[in-house]
Amino acid sequence: MVEMPDRIAAGLTAELDAVLLVRPRAAQARYHLPPRAAGIGGLAMAGATAAVLVIAVSGFATVATGSANPQVWTGQLAAGMQRLQAPVPARSSPPGREQPAIPGAAATAANGGEGGKPEIRRPAPGPGGQPSADPADSPRPRPDPSAGHNEHRSSLSPSPRPSGQTELPTSSR
Amino acid sequence: MEDFDRLYQAAYPKLLRTVYAVLGDHAAAEDCVQDAFVRAFKAWPRFRPERPPEAWLHQIAINGAISYRRHVRLRQVGELVRRLGRPGLEPDPSQALISGEVVAALGRLPVREAAAFVLRYYHGYNNREIAQATGVSERTVGARLAQARQRLVRDLGPAYGRLPTSPLPGVALGDGGDA
């Protein structure tokens, strides 16, 4: 156990006794102040909070609409409210005429169904009968080789094949 | 109201010295003590004389000092970040015997430990009274006092450590030391 040196206690006493005190008068104590003084701080806090909220909402609206004009905010807000309240329109186009998501599928659909159903890509057998397992090949819908089309469809695919390989007709069937 | 005013006049000096010893800042101590009396005044109708009013006031003041120290630490962290890369101001260890060092060392302790130390070695409270003033058990008070003593001896260095064989000049001792 650490012994408490007397010197520390003596030093503490000397330092605290040197603290000059004016005789306290209760009439000047803070708890005698009218409540209004404390309310000012509360009003200031409320004002600061409101200001922060306004700035935050303005910043959010500016980022969301891309404009710092409050009229633009209100206009877009009104448009959004109208969209929410408007009934969902029925689909005018038949299901078979849906817009395709990728150009390649659009061209495929335009060809009258050739390869309209995306084919699951299988590795084409190489010269030695071994299936090519080129990891660079990406699974992409390809036309059925048995249909006899040997067209190079790389121009129709959305992105070039990384290996630069061309499709070989499979005449093994 | 008159009772509370009398309590204010009697307890204010003690509370101020306690909080000043803990915070090391006279202005901050005055502010904390005034706030403590404001809170005590609001809670005065609910006060039960199960413990001494001074102990109750000390608890309120010490809690206020803890909150103040927390805010000061947050400000210091911000200032430290701004001063990154610049050399800091280290205290001179050769200034150990200058007055104010004990209070400065107390300011580096946790508030509750420093408060327990001041209540014991300045105000002369026993462990039970300190427990009432700080809202903890007497066992916790004993542990805090031991930790405070250990840290102060380590912080203040050999000038405040165990007495040497020959006393230092200019320092008044009691019975000659704790050897």
Image: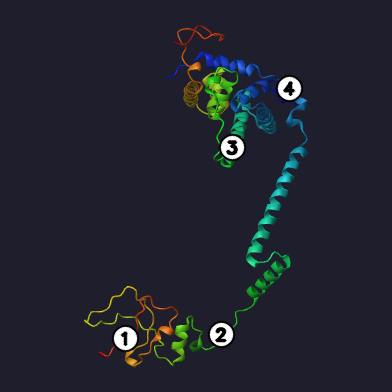
> In front of the other: label 3 or label 1?
1
The answer for which chain carries disc 4 is A
Q: Amino acid at mark 2?
A: Arg
Q: Amino acid at mark 3?
A: Gln
Which residue matches tag 3?
Answer: B76
Q: Quadrant of the N terminus of chain B?
A: top right
Dot 3: what SS? Answer: helix
Separation of residues labelled 3 and 4 (CA atoms): 32 Å
The answer for which chain carries disc 2 is A
Check contact, mark 3 vs mark 4: CB within 8 A: no
Separation of residues labelled 2 and 1 (CA atoms): 42 Å
The answer for which chain carries disc 3 is B
Q: Earlier in the sequence, mark 2 or mark 1?
A: 2
Q: Amino acid at mark 1?
A: Leu
Which residue matches tag 2?
Answer: A91
Check contact, mark 1 vs mark 4: CB within 8 A: no
Separation of residues labelled 3 and 1 (CA atoms): 73 Å
Q: Amino acid at mark 4?
A: Pro
Tell me the residue at 61%/35% (across/down). B72
Tell me the residue at 38%/89% (across/down). A151
